[in-house]
Image (cartoon, coloured by chain):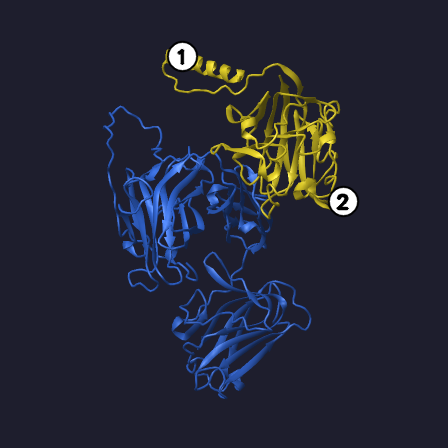
Amino acid sequence: MNKNNNIIKKTFLFAGILSLLLGCSTDEKQTVVTMTNLVMQDEFDVNGAPNSAYWGFDIGTGPNSNGWGNNELQYYTDRPENVKVLDGMLQITAKREIYLGSQYTSAKILSKGKFNQKHGRFEARIKMPWGQGLWPAFWLLGSNIDQVGWPQCGEIDIMEYRGQAPTVTNAAVHGPGYAGANAISKSYDLINQRLDTDFHIYGAEWGENYINFYIDDVLFKQITPEDVTGEWVFENPFYMILNLAVGGSYVGPPNGETSFPQIMYVDYIRVYN
Amino acid sequence: MKNQKINYLKFTFLLALLMITNVSCERDLSDDAQLSTFSKTPEVFIDGFSAGLGYGAFGGSKYTAFQVDSQVKYAGTASMRFDVPNAGDPNGDFAGGVFIDATGRDLSDYDALTFWAKASQGATINEVGFGADFGLDKYKISMKNISIATSWQKYVIPIPDASKLTREKGMFWYAEGPENGLGYSFWIDNLKYEKLGNIAHGQASILNGINKTETTFVGVNSTVDGVIATFNLGTGINQSVTITPSYLEFTSSNPSVATVNASGIVTSLSAGTSVITAKFKGVATAGSLTINCVGVFVSAPIPTRNPANVISLFSNAYTNVPVNYYNGYWAPWQTTVSNDFSVQGDDVLNYTIFNFVGIEFSNPTINATAMTGVHLDAFIPGVVAPGRQLRVIVVNFGANGVFGGGDDTRHSTTYTAPTLVSQNWISIEIPFSAMPNLGSRSNLAQLILEGGDGSVLYVDNIYFYN
């Protein structure tokens, strides 16, 4: 029933035969992406505020004023000093400043109500900020969140990053019975490359009963209904979120060695089916 | 190791243990071959010495501290074992030495020196590094206070700027004293240079990040030191290393006032102000050195008296007798802070924030019975305020030879304008016949100067004469 697995197997077989014929190469590249029909893109080419056709803003410290449920330390704003497009990049900037009761400011943009899609490939090219306590993320939430709440709406974390672990990317899914600390997650350590000194490509390819997570040319995790300890809630449209949090339960607070401001650079967002 | 200052750097070093192994299996090069670079071999010690490697222990260390161990190892067939001696070990009370490649290697492809290490007990190794070569140590770096455990762990020494290391002889060095007086053993294995690719955000400081100001004269040298570079490793840890100024590029804002060379030595050339700054790999470092050169230093007149007629406390013209100190830092009322300098071979006592200062020479005391007076030269660079005094006090400790005991005597002589002038050496000579309150001069022990107003006083050529 897994059509895509058959395609992957055939591709591997073909690649294997090709390698034999070519002789020298021992490199077996996995097939990382299969969906190539571009549906939506934001290349962040126009200086100024993010394109309002795609993006809105979350403001503040969360509906319960508890750091968005994670004890995060930042106050999200839509000010240009925290979020802007400049020279072909989206820049989300975390600043250390006293602002409306918080010690840090940053930004969170989301395509809720503007762009959502069920299934497909969601990809972003990102360069991380640096230092203990920085927590950037590229993730998806079910667009029925206002009706059914979280985690019933489902959450797909394509990339989460801890500033104090500069070679590691983290992916996860949250749903009913497997949310928060019980999310189904996977880390991938590039070891000899850092995510804060170069751009890398982060993506998820999501189809019926599977979600594949990749970074650059490495497919590092596939999650299927067998992997989750509850209902598979990933058959609805989801919207995208890009944000840079400071502190919180996932990453811990910045320390004396964390320098501010810190910037998350996003070169593009592309969605395929 | 705690509380023990290692003076190994002050010792001239002996190469006590030289182990050079030649295990190269290469064919000989033909006579036509041209080597375009030095060897890039990254391995220093894996299961034995890499080709061309030698070892020399620091002078003053326990020469037998290092050996190759084939029983305890992280991997392969052997490791390096270091047996740190106990405090007070007559054969040397610390372990330390240098691993040298005699020809030099090209390390420019690498970004770290790594090794695995463990110890017979939890300990903190004083220093490890590379770039020490029993020579100029031009690119020496030091990583300090390395926490070592009883299980093998990997350690990373970041290379500050590998592009400088195109011919480096100093492959690795270490220095470690006992822990709380007790010796122990530690092992190092798989010591090699690597290109980890995950070290970033290097930044450096000079003068420990402080913006320092120095007053100098023409011809006086100042040093930029306290150079520290910090890197973020792939583990997310910030690792600092002490490095030499040779890794930096220096700039003098006013080169006609002061110049700075590639080693961070600043030479003052003319009166004026210049700010010395540095860059590390193109990025400005924290810290700076502001030079205020006040101009040419006029030395005190060179003494002409026959040395046979002089007992000298402080002068470059004579051999000085033992002096306990030239500034007793007598708390709590003394504000005077010494900032002595040397200009073109002439040493000068420089008393700043001067209110009073004591010079003591009581070990032994001086018998000046055969002398007829005391001489000193004084220089007031600043303004001589109205009413300003300079008092010269000579103290005799008496027959008991120590301070107090009811037998001490002293005489104070006061000087004012017009003897006190600004910007000119003042030669002061006081015959003992003019110091009746001194009485005996068989156990002279102190010379005290009083009467500063918080300003600066230079003193030179202090001696008794006849």
- Residue B399: horizontal and vertical position, in percent? 43, 87
Q: Which amino acid does label 1 sit on?
A: Ile
- Residue A67: horizontal and vertical position, in percent? 69, 42
- Per the rendering, the colour in which chain B appears is blue
In the picture, measured across the screen, residue B104 lies left or right of residue A80, that is: left
Label 1 neighbour load within 10 Å: few <14, some 14-19, many 20+: few
Q: Residue at x 38, y 53 (%)?
A: B175
Q: Can residue A196 be seen in this view?
A: no
Give the structural element (helix, strand or loop) at label 1.
Answer: helix
Give the structural element (helix, strand or loop) at label 2.
Answer: loop
- Please name the residue that numbered disc 2 is placed on: A100
Q: Which chain carries label 2?
A: A
Nearer to us of marks 2 and 1 is: 1
Q: Which of B26 and A155 is in front in this view?
A: A155
In the picture, which chain is yellow? A
- Residue A167: horizontal and vertical position, in percent? 52, 35
Is residue B454 placed above or below A178 in the rendered structure? below
How many labels were placed on the picture?
Answer: 2
Q: Can residue B9 be seen in this view?
A: yes
Numbered label attached to residue A17: 1
- Quarter of the image with the C terminus of chain B in it: bottom left
